[in-house]
Amino acid sequence: MKTKLSAENLNISFANKQILKNVNVNFQENEITALIGPSGCGKSTLLRSLNRMHDLIPYADIQGLVKLEDINIYAKSIPVTEIRKRIGMVFQKANPFPKSIYENIAYGLRINNLPHDKTVIEKALTEAFLWDEVKDDLKMPAHRLSGGQQQRLCIARAVALRPEVILMDEPCSALDPVSTLKIEELILHLKQKYTIVIVTHNMQQAQRIADKTFFMYLGEVKESGNTKDIFENPKHEMTKNYISGIFG
Amino acid sequence: MQHKRFKLSSIIEWGSLTGTTLIVCFFLVVIILEIVFKGIGSMSWEFISSIPKEGMTKGGILTPIIGTVLITLITAAFAIPFGICCAIYLNEYAENNKLTRIIRAAIRNLSGVPSIIYGLFGLALFVQTLQLGTSLLAAGLTLGLLSLPYIITTTEEALMQIPNSTREAALAVGATKFETIKDIVIPSAVPGILTGVVLTLSRAAGETAPILFTGAAFYISDTNGYINQEFMALPYHLYMLSTQHQSIEEVRPIAYGTALVLILVVFLLNLSAFYIRYKFRKNEN
């Protein structure tokens, strides 16, 4: 197992309020890592720091190192667009572009000067388990798809760029159980090719799909390890209380 | 008893609101009917396609129609690019600090400045300082200035309607900030922006005060169309026919005809704004 993405001594504060405290984490290649913890613990902040989504927030202060293999992603010499191409992201609420299904995939490819002919689009949609449902309506506005389909389109959009890592911020929190199951199946399938980091509030989901689980509390990673160990033998009292639903 | 009192008060509440609305609508309908009935008599193809004749007591109003169309185009050419770019800067790039808040407040306040002040300013800046003379260009630029705050405000509001998650979606596939704005944000905001632009232009087309000092002419015998010369425009033509003409009674039908045409022009512009909105909404769903 090789470390694909890592954070070292990561401290993040927004307008002088410290959100992440000295976070040290490693994400292994071709593994799914779940970030769990109560609301406000810094899961999403950590996730978004991994592809520099905080760059546009003027009051965000980021100290420490985030490395993709051995590249410092915050290095001035690397364009942020290159980082985001290599580290894709799927958001909590499906946010397809207000364009056609086809264009939703083609746009990212075009701005990155990648080939964007129909075979590439088909491949991305197939990989996201969406092709069979939309192959006859590629020109249809993406907003007409169902919530679950939209989220799979967003995954296809990320996958199309052939990223190395895909970050997912509670991708199923707005979906019904059937769509959620489909996306989980998809995430497990994507693991073969990509390194996946997923934020989730759903304990069952973490157990179903994640290889590793990190429990966060008040901006710190309290416990990390194999999902099985975390859920069956939590070392910290707090982790135990959280996963058994005593607080959260 | 309690029940009855409740009923009475609700009738008063409902009645007062409905009553006010009816009074407002009444005056609106009276104004429109008055103009339509008195103006319809002088409406004909000849009226809108021939130039004023015999001291404007005969003939049509082609010259002021052309003038109004041209000045609206100049206003649009000046105010739309500047206004939209300014709004994009304010909403997408500018930090939310004290300075931008002051600038934003100043822009909102500018839209409340009486239009005659813009006329005076246009006279000082464009006509005199920049030596443009009283001309179509000077008046168009003055109307452009008047339109800017409206276009900036409506465009900014349209941009604010676009959720941040849409911007993040584009950034996450490796788009630069500029690409995000150009390819994703602006296209989504187009219906709102266009509606604001068209409504602003329809307001500008009906303005009299700003063009009064800056280029509108009492009468010109030639057809309009020279950017460096004076021009006739519908609102000023109407003002002149109804207050300044030597035989006001005689030209009254022409004045009402002009008013009707002006209202129709503004109405058509507004209608196109609604159409644009409708069309985009249909495309989205």
Image (cartoon, rainbow, N blue to C red):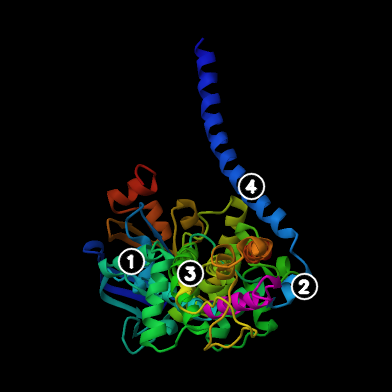
Marks 2 and 1, the one that precedes in the sequence: 2
- Left or right? Give the position of B165 relative to A39: right
Task: Determine whether B96 is above or below A85 in the image.
Answer: above
**Of helix, strand and loop, which one carries label 1?**
helix
Q: Residue furthest top?
A: B1
The disc labelled 1 sits on which kind of residue? Answer: Ala
Chain designation of label 2: B
Where residue A191 sits in the image (x, y, percent)?
52, 71
> Which mark's residue is nearer the viewer, 2 or 4?
2
What residue lies at 71% left-to-right and 68% top-to-bottom?
Answer: A134
Q: Is residue A166 visible?
A: no
- Residue B156 vs residue A151, the one in the foreground: B156
The disc labelled 4 sits on which kind of residue? Answer: Val
Marks 3 and 2, the one that precedes in the sequence: 2
Does label 4 lie on the same chain as label 2? yes
Chain designation of label 3: B
Query: Looking at the figure, which quarter contains the C terminus of chain B?
Result: bottom right
Q: Residues within 10 Å of mark 3 (few under 14, many from 20)?
A: many
**Of helix, strand and loop, which one carries label 3?**
helix
Residue occupied by mark 2: B46
**Of helix, strand and loop, which one carries label 4?**
helix
Tell me whether the residue at label 3 lies in contact with that at label 4, contact meaning CB atoms closer than 8 angstroms: no
Marks 1 and 4, the one that precedes in the sequence: 4
**Of helix, strand and loop, which one carries label 2?**
helix
Residue occupied by mark 1: B106
Where residue A228 sits in the image (x, y, percent)?
43, 57
Where residue A204 sits in the image (x, y, percent)?
49, 52
Q: Measure the alpha-carbon separation of dots 1 and 4.
A: 37 Å
Q: Tell me which segment is drawn in magenta.
A: B53-75
Numbered mark located on residue B151 in the image? 3
Q: Measure the alpha-carbon separation of dots 3 and 2.
A: 36 Å
